Amino acid sequence: MNKFVCLFSISLILPTAALAQESTPATAPPPAAAVLAEMNGYKLTDHDFEVLLQMLPSVNKQTMTPEQRQQIIKNWMQVVVFSKEAQAKGLDQDPVVAEQMEIFKKRLLFERYQKELLRQVKVSEEETQKYFEERKDQFQTPGQVRVSRIVVVTKEKADEVRRSAAQGAPFEQLAREHSTDEGSKQQGGDIGWLKPGYKEPELLRAIEALEPNQISEPFSTPAGWQIVKVTEKRPAVQKQYADVRKLISQQLLMTKQREILEATARELSAKYEVKILEAAK
């Protein structure tokens, strides 16, 4: 863990917490709370540490190592001693500090109320199942087509190569002899497996109706005139509900959460008569 980044992030997230720790009486911790660190007039208990972790969303408590735990404690104690010295120098009397503490308080209450709202949001199994049944086509492994191509400069040359292919000349040999596509000619024109959305729409349209071993008529593209051959096809595969259930549930939950936050914001803005005024010019 980067020590500077950790200290810096804690200082940004909790700039007023250490000041408030001494100026505002806190709820007494449980009698059995263990002391993790201390200084004159301040003790960091394991209860306080748990509260601190809740305010550091980037820290994963489950994967935190003993070294990371000690580093967080050390960083926090640095925040505390800095705040103590700031108080000693009277910086807590700065009007700007009071203004920022009030803003921080509003932000903290906002986050707490938001959590209370979102805790009520649930997604039922019926909703998840219905979403899947109505949108099965969205949960498929796309079909793929393996394609070989020949690229030439003129339509006349493309027609000539197409006639040779129709007369039985191997497509791979024609690609090596005539194609200007250096990336594929040495592979007999093979450009691999293509998925829906491939970057060349003209090519996708050309192969749409082709079956394996069929060769297209020449068609114009920005890269030149092309003739393509479908060598193999893989059909789309429908995913099973059990495989995508968790993903759907998460998507629905996020949508519901966004909707309830937006609706609550509109409701409370009306309740408290919020007006956004044009800034003075």
Image: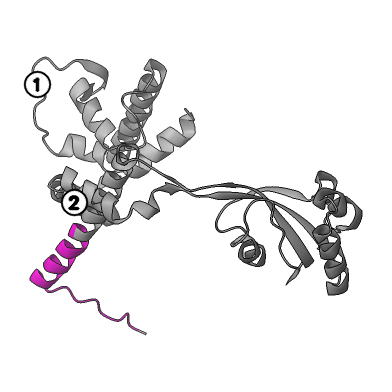
- The residue drawn where x is 64% and y is 60% is 207
Q: Which amino acid type is marked by label 2?
A: Gln
Image quadrant in which you'd find residue 6:
top left
Q: Which amino acid type is marked by label 1?
A: Pro
Horizontal arrangement in the rendering, residue 4 relative to residue 147 (left or right): left
Q: Is residue 50 visible?
A: yes
Q: Is residue 38 above or below residue 102?
A: above
User: Seen from this angle, which residue lies furthest bottom?
Assistant: 281
Range shown magenta: 260-280
Q: Is residue 197 above or below residue 23?
A: below
- The residue drawn where x is 30% and y is 41% is 241
Q: Can residue 14 be seen in this view?
A: no
Closer to the camera in the image, 190 or 66: 190
Q: How far apart are marks 1 and 2 (CA)?
A: 27 Å
- The residue drawn where x is 25% and y is 34% is 54
Closer to the camera in the image, 183 or 238: 238
Mark 1, secondary structure of its residue? loop
Image quadrant in which you'd find residue 9:
top left
Q: Name the residue under label 1.
A: 30
Closer to the camera in the image, 11 or 255: 255
Mark 2, secondary structure of its residue? helix
Q: Where is residue 240 in the image (x, y as percent from the top left)?
A: 34, 40
**Magenta region includes residue 121:** no
Q: Where is residue 258 in the image (x, y as percent from the top left)?
A: 25, 57
Closer to the camera in the image, 267 or 33: 267
The label number, if any, that marks residue 114 in the structure image:
2
Q: In this view, does 126 lie above or below 276?
A: above
User: Which of the two discs, 1 and 2, sits closer to the camera?
Assistant: 2
